[in-house]
Image (tube, helix red, strand yellow):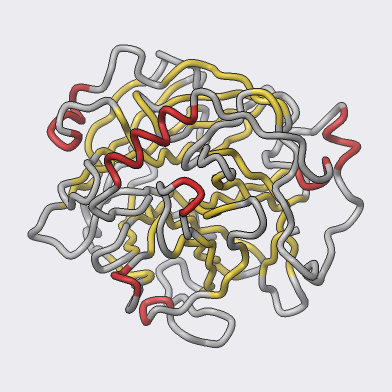
Amino acid sequence: MPHSPSRLAALGLAAAMLATAAVAGAVSAVQAATRGTAPVTGPAAAALPAAAPTAPPPSYPNPGRVTGSTGAHDPAVVRTPNGAYLLAATGDNLPLKTSTDRVTWRDAGVVWPGGAPWTSAYTGGGANLWAPDISYRDGRFLLYYSASTFGSQRSAIFLATSPTGAAGSWTHQGLIIESSGTVGYNAIDPNLFVDAAGQWWLAFGSFWTGIKSIRLDPATGKRSTTDTAVRALAQRQTAAGAVEAPFVYRHGGFYYLFVSFDLCCRGAASTYRIMVGRSAAPTGPFTDRNGTALTSGGGTQILAGHGSIHGPGHPAVLADNGQDVLFYHYYADSGAARLGINLLGWDSAGWPFVY
């Protein structure tokens, strides 16, 4: 989520638009496939192609077909133990949505029906919480999320857990990391990822000195007390440092760092685009397709605005029945923020593309 000075007003507009946004029918059901580990049945199963392509299409695809309650900003999705899909997004008290087929979505309340007063020191008393990251591990749902105000470096990331993921079932587990003018980073846009050795990491960051990661304790989900280093993953050298919304995904022996360049939260004028780099190690260095380090402004673009799809960004890559799926938000011509879902393919050199 961009941290330009106009963000607070823009987020307020986005939150209002979310309540009424609905996606018109778009491309094929194939592009609407998403992630998880449980078997897919019904119409969604028939939509899964036998094999992913190995070359990108000639132009960026439109988002796959989604229906129902499809307004979403900074969406994150997890597959639940019963095979359904649970989505969390930016908004007042963290809105939730559910789907049984990855196509039709319905509202499912909010994480904090009674509010989250422990965030007030960072939000100025507002209820709008940002950029949740949701996963299911060791028999419970984990939700990392951000609290801040537009343009401020006074920010924090918190953890909540739940046995069911349902609205009102979440327990506040405390502060993970905070930022202020005394540090070079901004503590928003969290993403939990687990490396091949089972170690937990949290990537985060927005503007300032870019994307960072810290080590977590898998037993608690909180910050490690033995390794407190803040590691650099990516930094933009131009465009006022506009890089944020990291998501790390392990595939084929590499860790892929997906980020958003440029600006969101401006409706149809948003310029968000999705970039990627990769590394053989979870802590980097990450480089793009040309070998440029992401800490030196590198990044390979895989999705950008096209036609009536404006500012696609805040990516989350999820695995479902052999498919690698990209969730993101984009803006319609009206300025409404909408849920985007596509599949990822991988070319012969191991680089992802959207189809």
Q: Residue at x 32, y 78 (%)?
A: 237
Q: Could you say where residue 43 lies in the image, as x and y percent from the top left?
A: 87, 30
In the displayed orientation, state which residue is furthest to the front: 334
Q: Residue at x 34, y 77 (%)?
A: 238
Q: Could you say where residue 74 lies in the image, as x and y percent from the top left?
A: 47, 42
Query: Is residue 45 found left or right of 300 in the rendered image?
Result: right
Depth order, front residue of 82/232: 232
In the displayed orientation, state which residue is furthest to the left: 182
Depth order, front residue of 13/298: 13
Task: Classify 126 as above or below 132.
Answer: above
Hey, which quadrant is residue 102 in on the image? top right
Query: Is residue 220 found left or right of 182 in the rendered image?
Result: right
Task: Classify 248 as above or below 189.
Answer: below
Q: How many marks?
A: 0
Q: Residue at x 40, y 21 (%)?
A: 111
Task: Classify 66 as above or below 111.
Answer: below
Q: Could you say where residue 199 lies in the image, as x and y percent from the top left?
A: 43, 55
Q: Which quadrant of the rendered structure holds the C terminus?
A: bottom right
Q: Residue at x 47, y 16 (%)?
A: 109
Depth order, front residue of 313/158: 313
Q: Could you say where residue 162 lies in the image, as x and y percent from the top left?
A: 43, 22
Depth order, front residue of 320/259: 259
